[in-house]
Amino acid sequence: MIQVLLFGQLAELAGASNLELDGVADTASLQLELQRRMPALATTTYRIAVNKIIVTENTPLSGGATVALLPPFSGG
């Protein structure tokens, strides 16, 4: 089971701030599953963190992993 945390506009799109998913082996299959459930994600920009580390490439997911979807943000 993978726990997915959603923040900001991504949580609004999902109607929830967290989801639990089974049967996703890596971040690419996770993105496909989330886009199937929430088609608006296909055109939304976000970053992915796996166990608190931002990833930029397809990354394997093991059971118990926590994935965070992070919308664009700025600081100042």
Image (tube, helix red, strand yellow):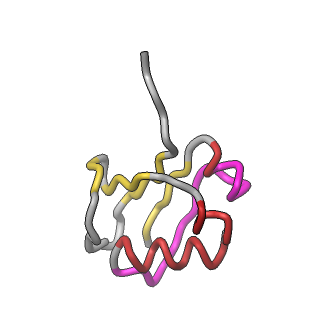
Question: 69 or 5, which is in the foreground?
Answer: 69
Residue 33 higher or lower than 64, as above or below:
below
Judged from this view, the residue extending furthest toward the bottom is 23
Q: What residue range appears in magenta? A: 11-25
Judged from this view, the residue extending furthest toward the top is 76
Picture quarter containing residue 34? bottom right
Left or right: where does residue 65 sit relative to residue 57?
right
Q: Position of residue 72 (x, y in %)?
A: 49, 41
Left or right: where does residue 68 sit relative to residue 17?
left
Left or right: where does residue 28 sit relative to residue 71?
left
Q: Position of residue 30 (x, y in %)?
A: 45, 74
Q: Position of residue 28 (x, y in %)?
A: 39, 76
The residue drawn where x is 66% and y is 74% is 37
Question: 76 or 63, which is in the foreground?
Answer: 76
Quadrant of the rendering where the N terminus is positioned: bottom left
The residue drawn where x is 60% and y is 63% is 43
